[in-house]
Amino acid sequence: EIEELKKELEELKAMIQNGAANTSGSVETSWLDQNKPNPASNETVVSYSVADNATEAYIIVFDMSGKQMEKVDVYNQGTIRVDGSDYNPGIYQYALVVDGEVVDSKKMVFVQ
């Protein structure tokens, strides 16, 4: 099971780095906005929308070396708050994954 999770993580990182976005099924009507404010010092907000027919959706945050920092399950439409105090200053990438497919990815910056 651990090996399967490692493989899935590698596939997700590759899709994010390549900017891949497959537009089939529930992915077509899902979207991810740029975090605001960006750059941020304390807290930033990410808006998203997940299609009603999606079975699984989450937002995942990586540092630029590919280390997963955070994973948040999401539903319907809404926002998540990312606490900058949990992050070192730098550039991070986040992505909305719906039913195993990367819908979109963006970069966020945290400063002191």
Image: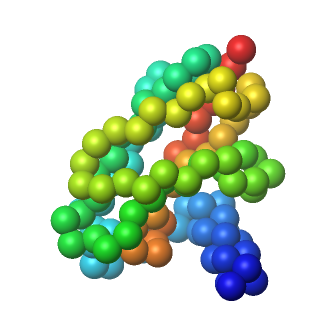
- Please, is residue 56 above or below residue 75 in the view? below
Vertically, is 104 above or below 94?
A: below
Which residue is rendered at x = 75% and y = 56% of the image? Answer: 66
Residue 105, can we see it? no
- From the viewer's perspective, is 9 left or right of 81? right
Q: Quadrant of the C terminus?
A: top right
Left or right of 77, for residue 17: right
Residue 96 in which image quadrant: bottom left
In this view, the residue farthest toward the right is 65
Location of the N terminus by quadrant is: bottom right
5 vs 98, nearest the viewer: 5
Q: Residue at x 61, y 17 (%)?
A: 41
Left or right of 37, for residue 30: left
- Total numbered labels placed on residues in the image: 0
Give the camera-side residue of 43 and 40: 43
Left or right for 32, reference 52: right
Residue located 28% across and 71% down the image: 54
Q: Is residue 7 above or below residue 71?
A: below
Residue 100: where, in percent of width, then height? 46, 75
